[in-house]
Image (cartoon, coloured by chain):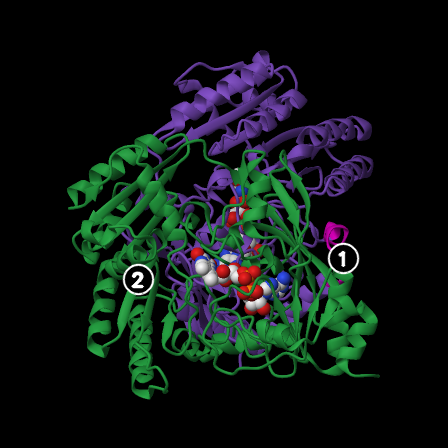
Chain colours: A green, B purple
């Protein structure tokens, strides 16, 4: 037997295997901070299910790890290369295999970009509901592997709720099909649900059957500016108490508004210290928007008037509000979720933490779900490592996690544990629950070759 | 050590343990046909999590099986007693422990009746969405263990979609908590989803955290009578093509209408050979109902006029259309689902099968989900076993299953495999997928004491 690279090249053909240094470096990391930088041995570009099976078999035979990768937009380090690993890119498997407008389902390869599927569905008055802010770049396979959320999940559910069936290559290279092509099905255990969110540690997703939902006919967007962040958070609760279910309910703090102003030259900061963006959709969108406007105005907001084109632009800005910065040791985006009733308390706590530890803070939140993305950062020195600053950052991060858990929350609402959040997982899940998961991992991947050191 | 009954009585107290013959017989079966009648050794009525732990530990120590039981309304035999088993009834654990209207969540014990939770939620403008037709009697624990569907699931999702977290007693008597109190959470593998639908074979559900949805302000109900069943089924597709998402979309065939007439003295049969019942809800209900009426009338239906009180009564009747008959060897209700585009073909196939095998047929369907409940039955002889009739019934059943699978469907949309449908599971799931499930079962329950011979 030759080296793993020789084996892969002879099995798959050279055009699917790269060992180019720049490529290896590019595919070594996703968009998360890196704790343990590793270059992969090779990057393999699978073009078919059989390619994936061949890669897994080769790696299994030679004791090399396999790190599945979609678009590498993950922000938890789930797609970071492991020691002694091959990165298996699914991006060339990007065909929509079937889209049946009467069944309201689609079957796609894992590398299909979220936005591409949505465009194809829109032609039939349909949509693929889960819409992470990365929808223009991230893949359905990556969305499935992280159980991605997004903006309209409060109303339409997360990725899990739209996935009906999966094709999965297991750690021994065999292929299984889980789930059902129908909307409902309860035969046997929910293996589909087990693979969703498992971050490439239980199997490689090579096919996804999704349920599509109806594209709303009517959409109303409301922008509500608030004098402070806590008041804006309480607006979220007020809409809930009116028993109106918006499709989108995004909360942006002052730091985020300032950042958007900086990038786009807008004047958001001058209009408020916080912004709540709400979109209602469907046949009742107008009536719902009326209720929302009334409720928010009563709660102290400056609310945009009917059919506000500006409000719609703001939603577009929000979709991009993560900006272009990639996280590193001086800047970390979080992904906690808290029960909705604790939103106001939690945003207060965040502001207090940032002040106490002397770090910068900006927050965006999928507020309808109680899912917050605080980003903490510290200014960096030009030519030196600043241990003190990094320590302050880490103290703030730890405090934000502890506070979320203390309020009955979770350390990750939608981004996954990956590699970066492993250090906090034990705070959320006690040992017996973690041990169960380790045993499930062992059952699916006894040799531990699938994305080791991630997710659990 | 004494007998299992002595152990249980001394651990739990006598008032929680019954060995009364009538009780044993009552708790020996649910509402499904019985393939292997077994009396349990005892019925235990747990009143607390600790009671459940004690029962499981006792049984584990003595090698006795544990069959969890909610209300026993299951129709797949999941709650049938096994050989050498204790039936563990959860019905006394019926407290709503928490209902937080701002969080829009509730925490309940497993024995809470679905309708009771819904009543409590309604006081806050909320609802627990999954509504099996058995909602007035079945328990949340049983709903979770079967991943129950219901009427309004096409719009609001099945039980899985409303369950956030579970407390589960494992086969060794230990207690774990899975999931999250928040709407979203992706820390680790989805153990919650694995327990949902596992029919008491992986653990005993002793606590359930659910997400509540908003009670719709406005509801519009439409009854559409059709000259034949196929045309009614095509009405379902027409509504879909109009991209309107009703909350309820129930399809009743001529046999069901005749049965309802017989029970309630109505004149449904004289008005059509099939009935499609549609309910729209929410702020857009009226506008959606308008579209639905137009589309159905264009498809050949006789549609009720606006704000029809009769249509609402019909939905109530439909909720009870299973009638009082319990299935047995002469009468079996099925639970297949097919992709929506195949609905018309499938109902045609059903009618042909019934004719070919000389059996009676009636069908109700949660048509929005493509989930059909055909009931096949044969007339029984007064004083003798009629092997020929039973054979014809079984041939029709097998044919209905084969046709559903052939069309890309599943053998169970919502009722579960239980005991009765095991004979067909191999037709849907190939051996490697079944073997994976057996290994998961072994991981959770190595001694095989939890509801053996069910679900997988
Ligand atoms: C600007 C920006 C905005 C974002 N907004 C959101 C948001 O709103 N909501 C949200 O949930 N996330 C968001 N994210 C995070 C990220 O986009 C999601 O996690 C996304 O689902 C990752 O998809 P990907 O194709 O990039 O996967 P990758 O990053 O390549 O991989 C993610 C994980 O999935 C595994 N994986 C990938 N493909 C497969 C496969 N086929 N089989 C098995 N395992 C696989 C990888 O090993 C890794 O563990 C955002 C990220 C960015 C950069
Ligand atoms: C008239 C009628 C209408 C129905 N309509 C529908 C419908 O529309 N949709 C639908 O999905 N079903 C329907 N069903 C089937 C049935 O009501 C559901 O399966 C229901 O979820 C069962 O709940 P239960 O409390 O009666 O559970 P049981 O019948 O007591 O038990 C069902 C299964 O769950 C297990 N179980 C019960 N409680 C627990 C627990 N706490 N922990 C672990 N395992 C447990 C049992 O072992 C068994 O395997 C209907 C049944 C009838 C009789």
How far apart marks 2 and 1 lie (CA) works out to 48 Å
Q: Quadrant of the C terminus of chain B?
A: bottom right
Query: Residue B321 shows which numbered tag?
Result: none
Q: Which residues, given as a range, are shown in magenta?
A: B423-432
Query: Residue B430 shows which numbered tag?
Result: 1
Q: Is residue B73 magenta?
A: no
Foreground of the two, A250 or A444:
A250
Q: At 51% across and 63% down in the image, what residue appears?
A: A73
Q: Are marks 2 and 1 in contact (CB under 8 Å)?
A: no
Q: Which residue is mark 2?
A: A363
Q: Locate residue B97: give its quadrant.
A: bottom left
Residue B230 rendering spot, x and y as whole percentages: 67, 23
Q: At 56% across and 17% down in the image, what residue appears?
A: B225
Q: Secondary structure at mark 1?
A: loop
Residue B23 rendering spot, x and y as whole percentages: 51, 54
* Chain of the residue under label 1: B
Foreground of the two, A235 or B10:
A235
Instruction: Please indicate, yes or no, whether residue A441 appears anywhere in the rendered image.
Output: yes
Both labels 2 and 1 in a single chain: no
Q: Label 2 neighbourhood size at 10 Å, few (<14), some (14-19), many (20+)? A: many
Give above or below for B254 relative to A135: above
Give above or below for B319 relative to B449: above
Foreground of the two, B179 or B33:
B179
């Amino acid at each position: 037997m030759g080296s793993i690279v020789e084996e892969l090249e002879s099995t798959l053909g050279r055009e699917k295997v790269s060992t180019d240094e720049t490529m290896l470096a590019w595919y070594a990391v996703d968009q998360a901070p890196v704790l343990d930088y590793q270059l992969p041995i090779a990057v393999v570009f699978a073009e078919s299910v059989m390619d994936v099976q061949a890669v897994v078999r080769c790696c299994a035979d030679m004791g090399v790890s396999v790190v599945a990768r979609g678009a590498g937009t993950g922000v938890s380090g789930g797609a970071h290369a492991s020691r002694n690993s091959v990165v298996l890119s699914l991006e060339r498997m990007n065909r929509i295999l079937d889209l049946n407008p009467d069944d309201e389902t689609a079957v796609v390869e894992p590398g299909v970009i979220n936005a591409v599927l949505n465009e194809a569905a829109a032609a039939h008055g349909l949509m693929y509901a889960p819409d992470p802010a990365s929808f223009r770049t991230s893949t359905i396979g990556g969305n499935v592997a992280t159980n991605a959320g997004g903006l309209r999940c409060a109303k339409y559910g997360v990725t899990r709720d739209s996935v009906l069936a999966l094709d999965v290559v297991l750690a021994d290279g065999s292929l299984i099909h889980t789930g059902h092509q129908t909307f409902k099905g309860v035969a046997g255990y929910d293996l589909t649900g087990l693979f969703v969110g498992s971050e490439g540690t239980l199997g490689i997703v090579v096919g996804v059957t999704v349920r599509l939902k109806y594209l709303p006919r009517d959409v109303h967007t409301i922008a509500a500016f608030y004098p402070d962040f806590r008041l804006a958070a309480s607006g979220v609760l007020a809409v809930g108490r009116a028993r109106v279910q918006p499709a989108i309910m995004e909360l942006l703090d002052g730091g985020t508004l300032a950042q958007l102003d900086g990038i786009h030259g807008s004047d958001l900061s001058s209009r408020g210290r916080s912004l709540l963006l709400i979109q209602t959709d469907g046949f009742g969108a107008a009536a719902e928007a009326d209720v929302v406007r009334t409720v928010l105005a009563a709660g102290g907001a400056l609310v945009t008037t009917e059919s506000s084109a500006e409000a719609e632009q703001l939603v577009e800005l929000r979709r991009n509000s993560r900006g272009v910065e990639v996280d590193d040791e001086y800047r970390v985006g979080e992904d906690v979720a808290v029960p909705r009733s604790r939103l106001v308390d939690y945003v207060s706590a965040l502001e207090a933490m940032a002040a106490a530890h002397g770090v910068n803070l900006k927050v965006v939140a999928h507020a309808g779900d109680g899912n917050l993305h605080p980003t903490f950062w510290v200014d960096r020195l030009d030519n030196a490592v600043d241990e003190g600053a990094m320590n302050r950052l880490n103290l703030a991060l730890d405090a934000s996690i502890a506070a979320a858990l203390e309020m009955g929350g979770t350390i990750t609402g939608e981004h996954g544990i990956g590699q970066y959040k492993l250090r906090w997982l034990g705070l959320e899940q006690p040992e017996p629950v973690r041990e169960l998961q380790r045993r499930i991992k062992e059952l699916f991947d006894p040799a531990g070759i699938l994305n080791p050191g991630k997710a659990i």
